[in-house]
């Protein structure tokens, strides 16, 4: 049985208490998972405020539906799936018109690797991801950060597999630009 | 998947630098408490509704019908003890003239009186008194078993004349006679008069109705149309988020559809159906800056249509500094309602019913248009509209029969909507008119 950090209860005991609508157990569960889920929300949302809203909706959904969790599969995975689905439902239909404007500046044939930014602090990466247009951000986070296949991404977002691939490619180009800009800005600040 | 995805690891490890603010938990706690309260409230209402329907139905079916119980006594001459004092046997239109006699029976130290004819039919009324008004003599005849004596209530003398009981004296009564029950109280004798033919007819029609019910169910079908008066949205209501010139106005929508009803008892009907509800909000005179390109992002709570390009927006906004926003919302409604007759005066045709029940809604249309004086642009849809809201409702329905099959029905319902908009409850008043066609099947 998995023993939780900062808790006298095992994960199963805590979940069972939450199933009985025990408020203390709910609060404890929130405290344990809030950071991990908040990171999930941050990479799918446009800013901190929207990520907090998404976290709120996620935990409300979790506590109202925790009776449906039958201890099959990882609980954390179940929580993350709910958080991701909540974020997707928030942005799925909110396609931005300025996507067209960005597209004209892209060089699609350019090969994009992000490994050169591996050493950047997480805050910079999150900021760059949050600047992406909604659909690019969703595709990028689902595929690149959460390990979904293009087929799964296309099903989740109601888009074709080729659209998912092209969105990922463009998202990476945007990210490179954003990350380069922010690192240049930092260098300039240091120089000054 | 990309090899050596270092970013993935960064996101999978909790980081103390990224913590949500404390208000998130407070908000979660509040929302969950509110949802639980709401859930309990809905269950309570459903329970109260079901309890009311069962109580009313049960009362109508069992208690009312017990007052007058119609039985076939052809074979119960030897079973007189089984009959109840209040039991009335319908001898149809046959006269009770012939060979009727009053007999007295002692059971459980209580006396009762029974009027018997040759066909073994009996007519009871009171436990210890029974009486007839003779048309020939215009006298009331009363038999009182407790006193073992017979009383004539004489109009001439304006007082009861009592003599020892003799059943043969009061054995004649036809359905033209009156049937009198009397009660002795400290102020004297109190008479309750019933017209025998009227009583017989009433009971016959009830019996016939019961017989019909065994074979048929009475159904009704009703096309309806009506208007929905919505609670005016308050100032910070999500629907008013884009309105710079808020004024509290009543919003009116309309509805149409049909209802199918079935008779449970003569007083209680249940119905369902399908109605289409239209709600329209117009937000007028939104100012736009002619110098800046129009952007749909300026509008709150809208999922914008992806096919609207900046060029289309520029063309739309060209030469205008004001525009209107039109919300068009449509729902299918399936009601589950009970309607109980509360007022039905004999000589008046108009009936009044109390109604209660609930409705399920299914979103049919959710669209928002931008309009100026010349053109309309489909902007998108509301992003906080609940696709399957639910309402409970109660109201009154008046019915006026045109003939045996058709009636005009007009009613009003107060509907309380749960989650019509996400986490926003509201109410509406529905006024509707319809023509009901009744048939047995």
Image (tube, helix red, strand yellow):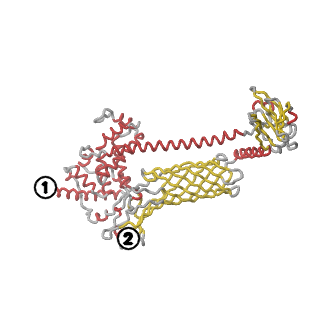
- Identify residue for label 1: A190
Q: Can the viewer see residue B96? A: no
Nearest the camera: B403 or B247?
A: B247
Where residue B92 appears, as percent x and y from the top left, is: 80, 43
10 Å crowding of disc 2: few (<14), some (14-19), many (20+): some
Answer with left or right where residue B184 lies relative to residue B30: right
Where residue B246 appears, as percent x and y from the top left, is: 40, 61
Residue at the spot 34% in from the left edge and 36% down from the top edge: A11
Nearest the camera: B260 or B430?
A: B430
Q: Outermost residue toward the bottom? A: B319
Nearest the camera: A102 or B377?
A: B377
Residue B99 figure quarter = top right
Q: CA distance from mark 2 to mark 1?
A: 47 Å
Q: SS of the residue at dot 2?
A: helix
- Identify residue for label 2: B316
Q: Outermost residue toward the left? A: A191
Answer with left or right where residue A127 lies relative to residue B242: left
Q: Chain of mark 2?
A: B
Where residue A37 appears, as percent x and y from the top left, is: 31, 45
Answer with left or right where residue B15 lies relative to residue A150: left
Q: Can the viewer see residue B324? A: yes
Image: A74 above or below B224: above
10 Å crowding of disc 1: few (<14), some (14-19), many (20+): few
Q: SS of the residue at dot 1?
A: helix
Answer with left or right where residue A92 lies relative to residue B280: left
Total residue callouts:
2
Residue at the spot 87% in from the left edge and 39% down from the top edge: B98
Where residue B228 appears, as percent x and y from the top left, is: 52, 58
Residue at the spot 22% in from the left edge and 54% down from the top edge: A114
Q: Chain of mark 1?
A: A
Which label belongs to residue A98? none
């Amino acid at each position: 049985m998995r023993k939780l950090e900062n808790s006298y209860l095992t994960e199963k005991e805590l979940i069972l208490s939450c199933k009985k609508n025990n408020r203390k157990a709910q609060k404890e569960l929130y405290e344990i998972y809030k950071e991990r889920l908040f990171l999930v929300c941050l990479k799918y949302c446009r800013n901190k405020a929207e990520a907090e809203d998404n976290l709120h909706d996620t935990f409300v959904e979790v506590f109202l539906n925790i009776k449906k969790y039958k201890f099959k599969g990882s609980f954390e995975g179940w929580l993350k799936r709910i958080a991701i689905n909540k974020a997707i439902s928030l942005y799925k239909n909110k396609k931005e018109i300025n996507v067209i404007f960005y597209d004209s500046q892209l060089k699609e044939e350019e090969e994009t690797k992000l490994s050169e930014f591996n050493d950047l602090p997480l805050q910079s990466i999150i900021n760059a991801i949050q600047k992406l247009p909604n659909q690019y951000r969703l595709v990028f986070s689902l595929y690149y950060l959460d390990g979904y296949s293009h087929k799964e991404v296309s099903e989740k977002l109601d888009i074709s597999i080729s659209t998912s691939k092209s969105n990922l490619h463009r998202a990476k180009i945007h990210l490179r630009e954003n990350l380069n800009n922010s690192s240049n800005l930092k260098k300039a600040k240091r120089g000054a | 998947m990309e090899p050596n995805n270092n970013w993935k690891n960064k996101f999978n490890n909790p980081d103390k630098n990224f913590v949500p603010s404390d208000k998130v938990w407070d908000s979660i706690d509040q929302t969950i408490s509110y949802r639980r309260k709401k859930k309990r409230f809905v269950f309570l209402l459903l329970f109260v509704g079901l309890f009311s329907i069962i109580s009313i139905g049960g009362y109508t079916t069992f208690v009312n019908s017990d007052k007058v119980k119609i039985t076939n006594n052809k074979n119960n001459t030897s079973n007189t003890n089984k009959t109840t004092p209040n039991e009335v046997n319908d001898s149809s239109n046959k006269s009770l003239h012939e060979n009727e006699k009053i007999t007295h029976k002692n059971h459980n130290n209580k006396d009762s009186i029974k009027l018997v004819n040759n066909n073994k039919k009996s007519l009871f009324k009171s436990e210890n008194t029974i009486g007839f008004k003779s048309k020939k003599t215009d006298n009331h005849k009363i038999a009182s078993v407790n006193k073992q004596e017979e009383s004539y209530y004489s109009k001439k003398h304006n007082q009861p004349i009592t003599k020892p009981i003799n059943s043969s004296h009061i054995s004649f009564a036809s359905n033209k006679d009156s049937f009198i029950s009397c009660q002795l109280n400290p102020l004297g004798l109190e008479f309750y008069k019933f017209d025998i033919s009227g009583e017989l007819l009433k009971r016959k029609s009830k019996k016939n109705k019961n017989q019909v019910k065994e074979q048929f169910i009475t159904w009704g079908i009703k096309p309806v149309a009506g208007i929905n008066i919505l609670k005016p949205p308050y100032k910070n209501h999500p629907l008013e988020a884009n309105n710079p010139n808020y004024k509290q106005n009543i919003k009116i929508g309309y509805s149409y559809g049909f209802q199918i009803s079935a008779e449970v008892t003569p007083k209680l009907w249940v119905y369902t159906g399908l109605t289409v509800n239209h709600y329209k909000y117009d937000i007028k005179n939104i100012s736009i800056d002619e110098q800046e390109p129009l952007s749909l992002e300026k509008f709150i709570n809208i999922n914008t249509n992806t096919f609207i390009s900046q060029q289309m927006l520029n063309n739309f906004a060209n030469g205008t500094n004001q525009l209107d926003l039109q919300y068009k919302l449509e729902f299918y409604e399936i009601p589950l309602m009970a309607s109980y007759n509360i007022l039905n005066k004999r000589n008046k045709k108009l009936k009044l019913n109390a109604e209660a029940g609930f409705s399920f809604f299914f979103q049919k249309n959710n669209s928002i248009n931008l309009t100026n004086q010349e053109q309309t642009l489909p902007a998108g849809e509301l992003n906080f509209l609940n696709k399957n809201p639910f309402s409970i409702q109660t109201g009154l329905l008046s019915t006026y029969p045109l003939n045996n099959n058709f009636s005009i029905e007009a009613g009003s319902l107060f509907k309380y909507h749960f989650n019509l908009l996400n986490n926003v409850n509201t109410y509406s008043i529905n006024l509707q008119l319809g023509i009901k066609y009744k048939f047995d099947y």
